[in-house]
Amino acid sequence: MPTSEETPGAGQAGSPSAEAPPAASPSSGPGRRMPRIALSRPVLIEAGIVIAASFLAVVLLTWPLIFNLGTDLPGGGSGGDRSGYTWDVWFNAEYGLRLWGATYQEAISQPFGRLMPASANVLQITFLGPAWIFGQFVGPVAALNMSLLIGMTLTPAAMYLLIRWLGLGMGAAVWAAAAFALFPNFLIRASGHYPMAFLACFPILLLALWRWMERPGWRRAAWLAAAAAFCWMTNPYYGAMGMVIGLVGVVIAAIETGRAEGLTTALRRVGEVAALVTGIVLVPLALLFWSSRDAVEGAFERSRQELDTYGARVGDYFVADNQQWFFGKVFGVSDWATMGQPGGERSNFLGYLTLALAAIGVLVAVRGWGGLSRRLRLVVVSAGPLMLMLGWFSLATPTYWFGVRIPTPSGWVFDAAPFLRVYARFAIAVTAVLIVLAAVGLAALIRNRGPLLAMGIVAAAVAVSAVELAPGGGLPLQTDPPLTVNGQAPEDVPTWAWLRDNAPRDALLYEFPGGANEFLERYHMHGQLVHGLGIVNGDPVGRSIGSDVTSAYPDPGVPHTAERLAGLGVDYVAVDPWLWAVVGSAVPADLATVPPGFRPVRTFPDGSAVWEVTAAPVDAVPIFQRSTWWAPEQVDGREWRYMDDRSAMWVYAPEAGDYRVSFSARSRPPGLTRQLAIEGPDGRTRRAQVGPERDLAFTVTLDEGRNDFTLVNEGAPGRQISASDLRVVSMRISEWEVTAVRADDAAPAPDRVPVPAGG
């Protein structure tokens, strides 16, 4: 940007030095005259022009979204994460943006609520904060879009700022900003993972890092720590990348400072950074995680297999995805479908123009090293280690090269932070560094060219990048409603529309099909944006009481469904046959038959329906903690579940009091007697000997709401059922029946599960 002060210096022959202030023309190149940016009027004018141009570019990239802000989203139409983020924005606007501790999202998974770490919102506050503000005035889709457009606008603007700060001129800055906005991983984020489309943190972090390396001191170290915090406040992945970037830069600076000024000075500078990063970044992070420690593991359940599925391969950086339209035109769509990379989370193609310009930048810098400014020397020296380290972090676990397994850090980090599992995303930071090197090359190419020729070269470079970088689907990005149902917008789905217009506002809804399926739950949650009712569905986490409830009642034909849903307080159920197809399941054959305990209220031509729950509610609802049991089986007309050596139950009681729990137990194999211990919510442990089959019953005091039970085999360890059946089991347990013990009832039969003295 225009400057008020320049550092004097003379370039050498063949070096990309600048003989005029960087703002003179698009052909200004790198050199020893380095600007110190002052907020003068020309700087503010240029900043305004850059922001306006960035916004215009984003409007073109998402066209015609600007005319459909309240209905459409980039990449919409298929539900999933897009619908999930829309629900997040709606929930925060309706119930408040919570930033500390663990919280229950009371609108879903009723009557329990979905347990979530509220502090995780701090780690996406750059997206959620503006969306929450906008959500006070407009609907969730519009609020999401407005926040997204801000992030997409600031991303290229931040890259422009970095390149101008390096003194590489307007032309190089324009191309770098455009390339950063066209990078396929950025456009993938803008099409679905909306909080991750805020990439401004990377140019700002690099600027803060190189500024500190240029002249280390505690003030610049504080700015570096603040930039790292900005990365964390954008997304946890970006925070992790920022720590890697900072660590590499600090090591390089320490080596250079140690050589120039001695070990003591180097240690002092490193200590300043370490202290400030600890105070500004690490301590707040530790407090945030501590405040929600009970919710983090359950809310973000991840599989180690995802380290391979969502880890990068080296080829991802050098070959575009197999749906990329330009290479499909060149090589043929069918051939490119087998030649290209998988895309998706692995859309990490850097672009051949970017790579070529970066190579030119390195070559020119090496030839004219003596004429480079200190800033550009730091860029060239640190870029290689930065990209290598970030690229290493991005690799899949496991990674094999020529049959040899390469050690990769993603597996080590996953052990400590299992909510980070898509390490291919580290390519975003790799790209940011590479674009800076490429800008050095472009600045050298247009140096000393006439203004028209320089502008022509820059325009051609932008055009080439747009052609080769645009991901599958091309540009502009596809925009549609967050989800569509048989071609209908969400507002027109028959069951959701009827409930919106007719159901009492305090009614509780259960939606069929049920099940612990994240994609399915996104549909149920989006339906809530239409009808506005509380729902029992909506918790996709595999190990939670909410998902255990919906898994127990996947369709209305499951025995005891009506009375147990009534026990949870459900007033209506919505039956949507099309949703079975969405999750790839067959529609139950008897779905058109209304089971006892339900009364049809409205049936629609597509087969969907709304039923009222008329069954008398059970006194309390027993819920098997699904992750601790084998799948249920029908034996002799009864439903049984195998347990290993330790399993768990939940019981929901609508009111506190004494309850009678009854069930049957069988040891496995039948000839072996085992001791079953039942640890109750009252702190008492009841024990019983279990042989071929035994009916068990006991009285227990339950609190209102959720009550936890643990069943433990205290006998011989469980055994594998057979050579062909690998399940390890100790006992088989029947369905539980839980009934209230009322004062006017006859005295219940004696407990058949005794409580030992002191137990």
Image: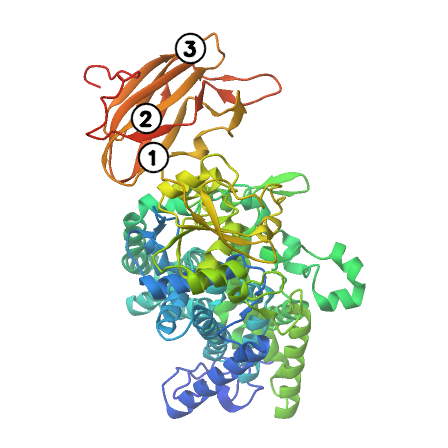
Q: Is the residue 584 above or below the residue 90 in the image?
A: above
Q: Dots 1 and 2: beta carbons under 8 Å?
A: yes
Q: Position of residue 6 (x, y in %)?
A: 42, 85
Kind of residue at disc 2: Val
Q: Dots 2 and 3: beta carbons under 8 Å?
A: no
Query: Who is closer to the viewer here, 731 or 502?
Result: 502
Quote the CA–CA distance across marks 2 and 3: 19 Å
Is any part of residue 617 visible from this angle?
yes
Kind of residue at disc 1: Val
Number of numbered callouts drawn: 3
Which residue is at a point 48% across and 7% down the rendered structure image?
A: 671
* Residue identifier under label 1: 651
The disc label shown at residue 691, or none: 3
Q: Is the residue 703 above or below the residue 168 in the image?
A: above
Q: Is the residue 135 above or below the residue 540 in the image?
A: below
* Residue identifier under label 2: 661
Is any part of residue 543 visible from this angle?
no
Secondary structure under tag 1 reads: strand
Secondary structure under tag 3 reads: loop
N-terminal of the pair, mark 1 or mark 2, is 1
Query: Who is closer to the viewer here, 280 or 37?
Result: 280
Q: Position of residue 383 (x, y in %)?
A: 52, 63
Foreground: disc 2 or disc 3: 2
Q: Position of residue 512 (x, y in %)?
A: 51, 48
Q: Dots 3 and 1: beta carbons under 8 Å?
A: no
